[in-house]
Image (cartoon, coloured by chain):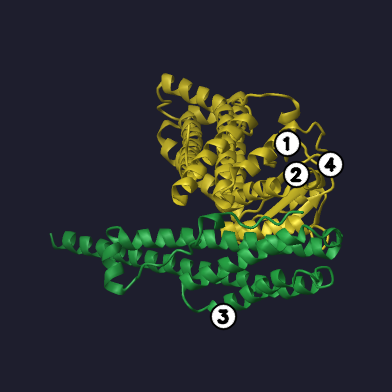
Amino acid sequence: MRTTFWNEIAANKRMSAALSFLMMLILGGVGAAAGYIFEPDIWPFTMGAALLAGVILWVYTLSSGDKAVLAISRARLATPEEDQMVTNIAQETAIAAGIPLPKVFVIDDTAPNAFATGMRPESGTICVTTGLLSKLGRDELQGVIAHEMGHIRNFDTRLMTTMALTVGLIVLIRDFMMRVLWYGGGGRRRSKDSGSPIILVVALVFIILAPIFAVLLNLAVSRRRELLADATAVQFTRYPDGLASALQKIEADQEALEAANGATAPMYIVNPIQKLSGGEMSSIFSTHPATAERIRRLKAMGAMIENTNEALGQ
Amino acid sequence: MIWIILGIIVVLIFAAMGIYNGLVASRQQVDNAWAQIDVQLKRRYDLIPNLVETVKGYMNFEQTTLQKVVEARSAAMGASGGGVKAQAEAENNLTRALGGFFAVAEQYPDLKASENMGRLQEELSSTENKIAFARQFYNDAVMTYNTKTQQFPGSIFANMFGFKQKELFELVEPEQREPVKVSF
């Protein structure tokens, strides 16, 4: 299978837009279901309120800070004197991406890995481990930096933060409804019309199951954004082999990343926790697509670039 | 009826404004991208005297190679302002001269071992990459802009307000497609 990175980028953007829309539907649906259980007539209002809360969360991510993750990971700022190559590569890739130069931090950890954060390109930050700097060659490092810069250019931190907060909101609504119904649905009995019993049951089941759907959807979006960042990295470097070979090395490395924990693991270029628990295949519970699958897609984009170069050379 | 016609006119005006602004923004991006190439080319000019200074003591017998680099640098600096094509050609000559220089430098173990040379080389190869990426970004911007000026309905405004096609920053020879790899 051959594909250009432009096609890959467009397809992944479409998919993640569709998944985000599904997430909105779940949020709106939970709001409507909760409203219907209280009072059959008010569901449009509670649905609107839930969607509005989602929008507020999204706006909130604009103003919130990025410092928490860096504090957890004990990172130091990279300097041109000490880390000449990685700071140079970051400058090069920022030119290719057409975004302001992100800050580059180095985490003292021998396991090779990297992540990016920042709600908007102006506050973009990339973290690499010392293991990554020592184990990868220049082209491989460039691939990794380009992948992280792809996340920054595509506003992925903001999207994933919004997604996580939305999942939280859906769980909150479920918990609230469970508590209210457990301690007696007193509010409902005041109503003359308690609604159709079938719809009531459906609404209740939906509220109970919605958090599970939301979590799975969140993971599906995360996997899409990884593929999108891979394709974006190819757009920047036009050299998929660098990233492919870097992914191979990071995946094969057996050292445990001490800086990572359950909360930060999904942010890395290869999930350091799911990697160690094994798994050649990605499942609906994976935060990242299987590394083998990512490499296969990169190779497909590489074949296309070579073809174009040949055509131009003639 | 009159309201419908008025409504359509308003919508058309807004659509026209959107297309016009899109063209302006796109042209702006092309100009910015060009400026970015310029910045990187200047950086390369600045690094070359350093390079000459560093290798002087080691490479007494390679004056011609060094001379070629220095001459290509002056020619490239002179070519700026002479249009995209002329400058691209002069810059490609400089890239080629640098490539030749580093091939010769391979033969000097003392030079290779020098830490100063190592740092300088990383700086130069990084600058080559920056030039290549800036050019790539410029060419992508030109492609987007040219497509907008050629496709309907943008083509109408492009003709009306004089949005001219922009030139790509092309490589002159096929062998020049790869940036010089300066690895020891």
Q: Which sits earlier in the primary sequence, circle 1 or circle 4?
A: 4
Q: Are marks 1 and 4 in contact (CB under 8 Å)?
A: no
Q: Nearer the viewer, mark 3 or mark 2?
A: 3
Please identify, in this view, whether the residue under mark 1 or under mark 4 is nearer the observer: 1
Location of mark 1 (residue) = A249
- Secondary structure of the residue carrying tag 4 is loop
- Mark 3 = which residue? B78
Quadrant of the frame with the N terminus of chain B: bottom left
- Assess whether mark 2 and mark 3 are in contact (beta carbons under 8 angstroms): no
Which of discs 4 and 3 lies nearer the camera? The answer is 3
Q: Say which label, 4 or 2, has the lower sequence index.
A: 4
Residue at x 30% of width, y 64% of height: B14
Q: Residue furthest left?
A: B1
Q: Report the disc number at residue A110.
A: 4
The chain painted green is B
Q: Is residue A206 left or right of residue A247?
A: left
Letter of the chain that mark 3 sits on in the rendering: B
Quadrant where the image shows the C terminus of chain B: bottom right
Amino acid found under the numbered disc labelled 2? Leu
Element carrying mark 3: helix
Q: Secondary structure at mark 1?
A: helix
Q: Residue furthest front?
A: B61
Residue underneath mark 2: A136
Percent position (x, y) of residue B164? Answer: 35, 70
Residue A135 lies, in percent from the top left, at 79, 42
Q: Colour of chain A?
A: yellow
Q: Nearer the viewer, residue A231 or B75?
A: B75
